[in-house]
Image: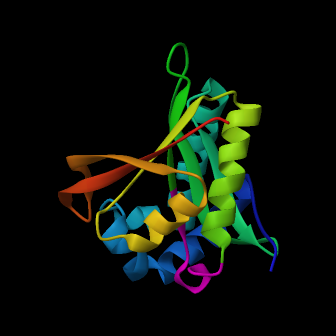
């Protein structure tokens, strides 16, 4: 299997909507609560359009995760801050059938290289729920180090939840 990442495109709206519908229950414990419209092709088209606008402003890098050229997930470098910080926040997910097969680990590694080599960032941060051991392993295998704990950090599955914080610095 060949895992990769690429810039998200408007043509990804239908495949992403299908993937999200099929994986809604799988992703629900790890994701913000989302309106039903998010899981439609139109909702994904609007999401992609917004992501591409933010990319144009330099605020984010929106990617899809692929296995053998088939979309299996998403990865974003969000909240890019320039100047003295040169940092971004990493967020990602993969479909249930792709979990445990290296797609997320490969994608995180490739995105980190893009963030450091192409975007010139100094630091990437990522947070996981404390009980999300799989995501923590992905980050650790991708060179991220645990550096903190943030109480009630993000609203996930409708509740403010604690997160374990990881970072990776440019080599």
In this rendering, is residue 136 above or below 110? below
Give whichever of 72, 3 is nearer the camera. Answer: 3
Q: Residue 153 colored magenta?
A: no
Which scheme is used to colour this image of the protein?
A: rainbow
Foreground residue, 168 or 45?
168
Percent coordinates x, y for residue 83 in the rendering: 54, 13
The reply to whether the magenta stretch includes residue 95 is yes
Q: Please state if 149 lies on the left or on the right of 74 as rendered.
A: left
Task: State the residue at coordinates (62%, 27%).
Answer: 58
State the residue in front, 118 or 149: 149
On the picture, is 47 further left or further right than 156?
right
Q: Is residue 133 left or right of residue 73?
A: left
Is residue 91 depicted above or below 49 in this figure? below
Q: Where's the N terminus, which quadrant? A: bottom right
Instruction: Report if residue 8 is visible in the image.
Output: no
Q: Which residues are magenta?
A: 92-101
Residue sitting at x 44%, y 64%: 136
Residue pushed farthest top? Answer: 83
- Counting from the top left corner in percent of width and height, residue 21 is at 49, 78
Above or below, 129 relative to 145? below
**Is residue 37 visible from the viewing direction of this image?**
yes
Q: Which quadrant would the C terminus be assigned to in this image?
A: top right
Residue 18 image point, x, y percent: 58, 77
Indicate the quadrant where residue 113 lies. top right
Expressed as whole percent of the image width and height from the top left, the position of residue 68 reads 82, 76
Residue name at image x 45 percent, y 73 percent: 134
Q: Looking at the image, which residue is at 51% across and 14% down?
A: 84
Q: How many marks?
A: 0
């Amino acid at each position: 299997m060949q895992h990769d990442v690429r810039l998200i495109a408007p043509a990804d709206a239908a495949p992403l909507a299908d993937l999200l519908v099929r994986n809604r229950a799988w992703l629900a414990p790890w994701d913000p609560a989302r309106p039903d419209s998010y899981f439609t092709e139109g909702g994904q088209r609007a999401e992609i359009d917004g992501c591409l606008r933010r990319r144009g402003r330099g605020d984010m890098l929106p990617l899809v995760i692929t296995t053998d050229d088939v979309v299996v997930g998403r990865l974003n470098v969000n909240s890019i801050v320039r100047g003295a910080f040169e940092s971004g926040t990493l967020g990602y997910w993969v479909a249930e059938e792709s979990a445990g097969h290296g797609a997320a680990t490969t994608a995180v590694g490739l995105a980190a290289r893009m963030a450091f080599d192409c975007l010139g960032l100094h630091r990437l941060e990522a947070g996981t729920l404390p009980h999300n051991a799989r995501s923590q392993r992905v980050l650790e295998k991708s060179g991220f180090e645990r550096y903190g704990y943030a109480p009630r950090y993000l609203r996930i599955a409708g509740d403010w939840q604690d997160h374990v914080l990881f970072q990776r610095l440019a080599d």
